[in-house]
Amino acid sequence: MKRIQIYSLMFWAVILCSCGAKEQDVRVVKDFNFNWNFKLGSHPEAVKEDFDSSDWRALNLPHDWSIEGTFSKDHPTKPEGGALPAGEGWYRKSFELPEGIKGKSIAIEFDGVYRNSEVWINGHFLGKRPYGYISFMYDLTPYLHYGTQKNTITVKVDNSLQPNSRWYTGSGIYRNVRLVVTDKLHVAHWGTYATTPEISKGLGTVNYELTLQNDHNQDKSVKLVTSIKSEQNEEVAKVISNENIKANDFFVLNQDLEVKIPVLWDIENPYLYTIQTKVYEDGRLIDNYETPLGFRYFNFDAEKGFSLNGVPTKIHGVCLHHDNGALGAVANNDAIKRKLTLMKEMGANAIRVSHNPSSVELLDLCDEMGFIVQVEAFDTWKKKKAKQDYHLDWDEWHQKDLEDFVLRDRNHPSVMMWSIGNEIREQFDSTGVAITKELVSIVKKLDKTRPVTSALTENVPEKNYIYQSGALDLLGFNYKHKDYTGFPEKFKGQKIIASESVSALETRGHYDHFDADEIKRWPPAHNEPFDGNDDFTVSAYDQVSAYWGATHEESWKAVKALDYIAGTFIWTGFDYLGEPIPYPYPARSSYFGILDLAGLPKDVYYMYQSEWSDQDVLHILPHWNWTKNQEIDVWAYYNNADEVELFLNGKSLGKKSKKDDDLHVSWEVKYEPGTLKAVSKKEGKVVLEKEIHTAGKAAQINLTADKKEIRNNQYDLTYITVDVVDEKGVLVPNANHLIEFEISGGGEIVGVDNGYQANLSSFKASEIKAYNGKCIVIVQSNGKKENIVLKATSQDAIASNSIEIKVIN
Ligand code: GAL
């Protein structure tokens, strides 16, 4: 508490002095996430200015109340929605503004509130935004108090109408909130737009559209200085102009700049320039605004697929929902960065944000880390998929939401496709034609530099009305990989991407022994019953998919073989909450991920790594704890080698090589305990060796942190993986010990998970059972600058362990 007050004092001191106008002070973007009060239920009286909410729960944003709840099949969100509670909740925050700040413009920005948010400042209603994924702002200036009189923001969040989604949404102010303080004459909200009309080795041209907002009652004369800075902060281009801005009006200006020998933005070297605009009035700096800039060009070709900066590049993509596993919908930079890092290490070069506007952090990170991004506006238009979903808001809101989606995201070099919808029902009827045309024209008015696409399922051209509109630049097709070969004939001259593929099903570390070549569809066909496993697991051999999908290998082989398919987006990079196909409750999260909900890789992660990355890969599965003489299929994923030889307890079981389009090799092995060793060789030279051992009794807990050091900023996270191992340190593959955590120092536990799709224990507890030998605990800095010690114990006669995390400023 004290720390935050000190911070606030410093903050306002800076604003008050800003007439001296230091560059960093003229536009103050204040983190507004701290010190809110929250209460579940309906509290209409809380809109009143003098309402006392001091007995409400104190918390910091971003916050998702659903993830704090307990699972039940009776929650109206249903298991498809994650089987967690939704309902209504209210947030309040009080703050003071010093007298000296009078005359500034003050706005509040919300990155996302799920859903139906309504906002009041000091009893004045500011507005409503139904769509739970859209970013929005309100101007607070006319209603504020200065001096000792407090201001209060009240936010009502109503997620009670259910079901409103086909997956877990979360509930609350689950993304960041900022207060933005500027001069009354300032760069407008989302008020810059940079494009790069020409890029060659020697020259990059930049067209920069700048919108200024003048809230003064007088006309103003300003000098505008726009410069482009390199990553090393060198000025590489500059343009100056003097303009008159009318009172209470907006002013739009176009500036052209040139950068000599631009460094290109690409996947390996995502080089970012910054456009900086400084606004001066009478020689005084009054605004300073920055926009990221990347020089990159790309092309979709109907025959050759995708190229980036002239280099043919297959899109190796994954679809990602917005939830961050045990954290729920909370948009945390570290959680998102961990997901993207795991994808990058796998060799993915693209993300499809399914099926809604993303967090700001995801796109900033994709710019910085080098991903090709397809952003997506909607999962429904006028026709519903869930009873209470966005179709209810369509008529009133779709235009504004789509505009805001493009306005916010059009400066991200990583964003290369606008998707106007996923598997939209209107593709099947003629109303789809007009709506598609309307949506495409909304997007094109705001950005013509990226293709507009939609993820379609109907691939009979005459029956697909979204396609029939003729308005799409790029056709996305979901699933049906066997039809790809017919596309050039059916969709002559069209550019095509596999916007969604696979939908294979797996549980990390669980193996069913089907016949080697057997492939299962679970459920077998529409509404047909199937015999699954009693414990709600699905085998992690890549042999099971939803009936509309394919195994990972089936799908990737089809995409890989065809140049005209620009690439693929796997459904999905990670398991996500909700949509627990093929099982009923207690299954409550999906089986589709290449990694589980906790972010622990399933075996197929290494198939992609062997295909999509340059690094040497050799991975064998399953684990090596079976019944003597049991027939076990051993699979190996490998690359950069001609063959793999397998040894059991030193005895060779033979060499295998991938033939034709094989993506793995396998051996049928009669199990005996001991050591299974694989050796990959290229031209007779060893590339990699990999051993797995039969584990003995669980004896210890191993703790591995993805970060050994975090900052005391109350945001940073470290993910600690718990392995239950035997005396020799071998993972015990079916260990399910209850692990209890104790934490001290500058951190707190914000989530636990074991990736098991039917686990019903709380994500917010300080204990969890290991699942197939593993679980994770997520630790967040709590503001204290004290090293963190996390201790993990189990009562099941295994030794406890602890890990220390350094906390820095
Ligand atoms: C697709 C849909 C996704 C997800 C997936 C599951 O048809 O676009 O959102 O539901 O199926 O297989």
Image (spheres, rainbow, N blue to C red):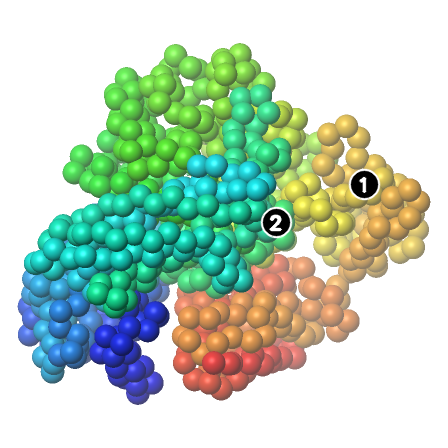
Q: Where is residue 486 in the image (x, y as percent from the top left)?
A: 55, 15
Q: Position of residue 348 (x, y in %)?
A: 59, 45
Counting every numbered tag in the picture gives 2
Q: Name the residue under label 1.
A: 667
Quadrant for residue 65, please give it: bottom left
Note whether 721 is above or below 235 in the view shown.
below
* Residue type indicated by callout 2: Glu
Note whether 179 is above or below 621 in the view shown.
below
Q: Position of residue 388 (x, y in %)?
A: 23, 41
Q: Residue at x 76, y 50 (%)?
A: 616
- Which secondary structure lies at badge 2? loop
Asked if the residues shown at circle 1 and circle 2 are in contact, with their CB atoms under 8 angstroms apart, the answer is no
Q: Which residue is drawn at 33% across and 19% down?
A: 469
Q: Which residue is drawn at 42% across and 76% down?
A: 713
User: Would residue 126 appear left or right of 612 to someone viewing this image?
Assistant: left
Quadrant for residue 422, please give it: top left
User: Would residue 457 appear left or right of 392 to someone viewing this image?
Assistant: right
* Residue type indicated by callout 1: Trp
Note whether 14 is above or below 317 in the view shown.
below
Residue 44 is at least partly visible in this image: no
Residue 256 versus residue 113: which sits nearer the camera? 256
Q: Residue at x 66, y 42 (%)?
A: 612
- Label 2 crowding class (10 Å Cα cut-off): few <14, some 14-19, many 20+? few
- Label 1 crowding class (10 Å Cα cut-off): few <14, some 14-19, many 20+? some
Residue 688 is at least partly visible in this image: yes
Quadrant where the image shows the N terminus: bottom left
For the residues marked 1 and 2, what is the alpha-carbon distance in whole angstroms? 36 Å
Foreground label between 1 and 2: 2
Quadrant for residue 461, please give it: top left
Q: Name the residue under label 2.
A: 268
- Which secondary structure lies at badge 1? strand
